[in-house]
Amino acid sequence: MNEPLMILIALNLLSFIVYGCDKYLAIHDKRRISEKNLHTLSIVGGFVGSTLAMMLFRHKIKKVKFMLIHSAIFIGWIFLLYFYFLSNFLNSSV
C-alpha cells in the first residue's frame, strides 16, 4: 500500500477511537474532548472514522451545529478525493 493511504487509514482509526472515548466520557460525566478537536481530526483526514463512530455510538448526532460542520467537512473531503482521482485518471489516460 502507498504511504498516503496508510496515513488516511491510521487517521480514520484514530478518529474512530477518539469519538468512542468521547462517548464513554460523556456517559460517565467526565471531562470531554472538545468539539474543535473532534472537527480537527475530521479535517486532517479522519472523516470516515468519525462518521462511522458517530453512527455506531450515536454520538453528537442530535447537535445540529456539530452535524452541519461535520457534513461540510465530509463533503469537502469527498470533493477533494473526487478531483484527486479524476486528475490522476486524466493524467494517466493521456
Image (cartoon, helix red, strand yellow):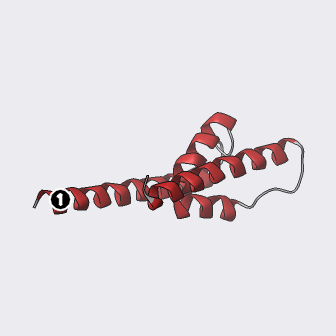
Residue at horizontal 87 percent and vertical 57 percent from the top: 31
Rendered residue at 61%/37% (across/down): 55
Q: Residue at x 53, y 51 (%)?
A: 9
Instruction: Name the amino acid, label 1.
Output: Ser
Q: Position of residue 78 (x, y in %)?
A: 39, 53
Residue extending farthest left: 94
Residue drawn at x 29%, y 59% as measured from the top left? 83
Position above or below: 53 against 43: above
**Dot 1 lies on which element?**
helix
Rendered view: 16 above or below 92: above
- Residue at image mark 1: 92
Quadrant occupied by the C terminus: bottom left
Work out which residue is located at the far front of the displayed protein and give it: 1
Query: Left or right: 60 with respect to 85?
Result: right
Location of residue 75 by image quarter? bottom left
Which residue occupies the foreground of this view, 63 or 30? Answer: 30
Viewer-nearest residue: 58 or 90: 90
Q: Is residue 47 left or right of residue 53?
A: left
Q: Residues within 10 Å of mark 1 (few under 14, many from 20)?
A: few
Left or right: 50, with 3 as reference point:
right
Q: Position of residue 45 (x, y in %)?
A: 52, 59
Residue 27, how many percent across, how many down? 84, 41
Left or right? Give the position of 77 relative to 51. left
Foreground residue among 10 and 19:
10
- Judge whether 64 appears above or below 42 on screen: above
